[in-house]
Image (tube, grey):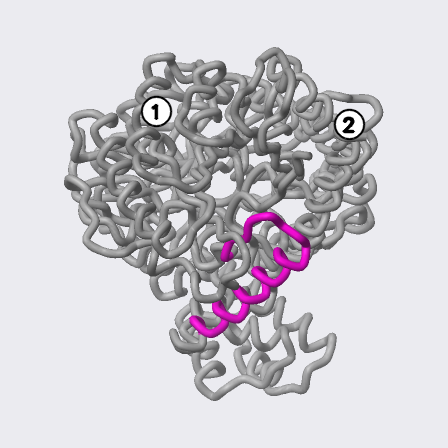
Amino acid sequence: MDKLFPTQEIGSLAKPSWRVKGYQGDELTENEIAEAMSWGEKLGIANLEQLIQVLKNKNSPQRRKAILEWAAKYAIKFFEIAGLDVVFNGEQWRSEMYEHFIRRVSGFKVLGFVKSFDYRYFNKAACIDPPKYIKPIYLEEFLFTKENTTRKIKVPFTGAYTLVDWTFNEFYEKRVVDKVQDFTRRKFEAKKDFLFDLIKNVIRPEIKTLVDSGAEWIQIDEPAATTNPSSEEMELFVEAFNETVRGFNCIFSLHNCYSNYKILAKYAPKLQNCGQLALEFANRDNPQIGLDNIRTSYKEIKFFEEYGFSGNYGLGVIDVHSNFVEPPELIRDRILYAAKIVGDSSRIWVNPDCGLRTRSWDVSFQKLKNMVLGAELARQSLE
Amino acid sequence: METIECYITGILPRPEELIEVTRAYDRARISREELENAFEKATKEVIRIQITAGLSYITDGMLKWQDLFRPFTEKLEGVHVGSLARWFNNNTFYRKPIITNRITCEKNILEEITYRKLIPKDVLWKVILPAPYTFIQLAENQAYSNKTDLMFEYAKILNKELSKLVNLGVKYIQLSDPALVYQPISKSISRDELSMVKAALDTTFKGISVKTCLQTFFGDFTQILPEALEFSVDHLGVDIYETHMEKLVKYSFDKGIALGIIDARNSLMENMDELVKLAKKIVKTIYLSDFEEIFVCPNCDLEYLPWKRAKEKIKTLRVLATRLEEELHG
């Protein structure tokens, strides 16, 4: 990018109720249709009467496909109008990052819900056969996004280590039972086999498909990266990332959030072809404006610098779990504080902590607009 | 002839129907009363499953517990409910207890959260609670000049709460202490710290007459040997999937052992032959002559599995216990 502090999204955006209910085949209320209209007008979307017609139609495969396309158009425009430099489709075609992936690959069987926290759960699968690539996972949404924007595109891609860490490993554990007697070693050996089969059979073919179709930047999402902080597991994570990206003519970045950055920092310099680390900080920072010690969470950038990470940072300046709309001045100070630690402003990109799927469109829009304004203020203060 | 006992060791997963109700409640689509009813119905079911499976002690399943600390985090004076943090090396999160002031207890925390009335009078009732060491390690201390003071105050509160539960009929108390053995990067817990842990357990169990167990998981139990053999508990719980067997069998035990041998973090059903062989080897080597009380159990909370699979695993516990018994006496 030819300007300082380019702005980007991380991935998801909430799905409007006309997208959710419409896709399920439910009838929409007047209010829901009106909401689609009002956002459509706000975003300057053309031919809105066609969307109304689609929403009023009876459920059919054509209607469902049209609703997905309209939702993607809306999300792309949402990011553009908010002023972001790098966009995608708000993951409007994905149920969520884990289930979307494993339901499109053979070898996985969904077993049921397990608790994530409180009354939140995720649908956990078991690997029951070697994973096999049967059809593109993200290709269609990438192609659609490419057709519908002139901005730079970054494709969010759920990383292999996270997929494996979140899946029961039945097939490979059964396979090593006779080979590995020690229970503590068995899981690790089986995990390795699963991980590298998944990368070879599914992840790399999908990346190749994306790159062959013109994808220039893929963001590997690895929220589970530091779940197992032992050196053996962290080395495995690094090896998985490096094997994932090996030899592709494409920019790669890593997104990781709500994790142990002291641990991640130690291994970050070993990540090959990792142009950017998109990290979460705002969630743990103070809401007051200022450039001194008040920026508690951003101090952690020091870990990455001390260990020698030389790529760019995607600086999380927006808390995605709160409706507090960060003022531009606060975002500015977060950026300037991090830029000072890094000592090279050109290495700082600006983004929300994580995907915005848990916030309403109103809140997300305000937050993103302020993020763009905050980046501009930071640029001005350095001129 | 000694028998091999069995029980579960933590929070059970919520059955599907209950999950749907909690989600509806979360989205403000149903009332608090409907939620409470669903919890009660599901609790009856998980109690029934344990009894039918022939478990030696029965818990209420802890379906309401959002995490191991939550009843304390929400009800203790001096503690605030903090932000989400990862629960050890799992894709599961707990809310950090933030200690903002000296902690005191004005309420009947455990009496309120446990479903005593749903446990039939003719079964042995077991409760599971956070151990002092794990509580202080995972809490954020903003009030005490050192964490050891906090540990002892929590232990004192726990002691009072436990006395009340014993009066209500509890027959078995397990303290869950994963932090004691989960050391993926740093060195094992120091000998000095272990002696403080021992003292805190003394405080916790002072005057408590029922059976007690310190259940460790997510880490290698041998790190806390031989000191753990002196802890004031009747039984020690070991996570077989994280513990170095060759080191474990070098010690001789004069306490009972709870073998965490059903893997609660793996959906694969266990190979019984292999488990019986391993359990037999452990028992034969750590007990030189007569063996003490022995339990087979899940290594940790079964909530890492979907309910259907957890239910299947609960059903294998008595089968495993019986087979081990036959092997040891045969």
Span shown in magenta? B35-60
Residue appearing at x 70%, y 20% in the figure: B284
Label 2 environment density (alpha carbons within 10 Å; few <14, some 14–19, many ≥20)? few
Q: Position of residue B275 (x, y in %)?
A: 74, 32
Q: Quadrant of residue B153?
A: top left
Q: Give the residue at the far front of this rendering.
A: B1
Do callouts 2 and 1 point to residues on the same chain? yes
Q: Helix, strand, or loop for circle 1?
A: helix
Residue appearing at x 62%, y 52% in the figure: A146
Apparent side of residue A25 relative to residue B322 in the rendered image (left or right): left
Is A245 within the magenta? no
* Label 2 – label 1 distance at C-alpha: 33 Å
Name the residue that disc number 1 marks.
B197
| The one of A380 and A75 positioned closer to us in this rendering | A75
Label 1 environment density (alpha carbons within 10 Å; few <14, some 14–19, many ≥20)? many
* Image quarter in which the N terminus of chain B is found: top right
Q: Position of residue B236 (x, y in %)?
A: 51, 29
SS assignment for the magenta stretch, majority: helix
Q: Is residue B77 above or below residue A28?
A: above
Residue A73, labelled with which disc?
A: none
Q: Position of residue B229 (x, y in %)?
A: 47, 20
Q: Is residue A64 above or below residue A88?
A: below
Residue B277, labelled with which disc?
A: 2
Q: Position of residue B71 (x, y in %)?
A: 34, 52
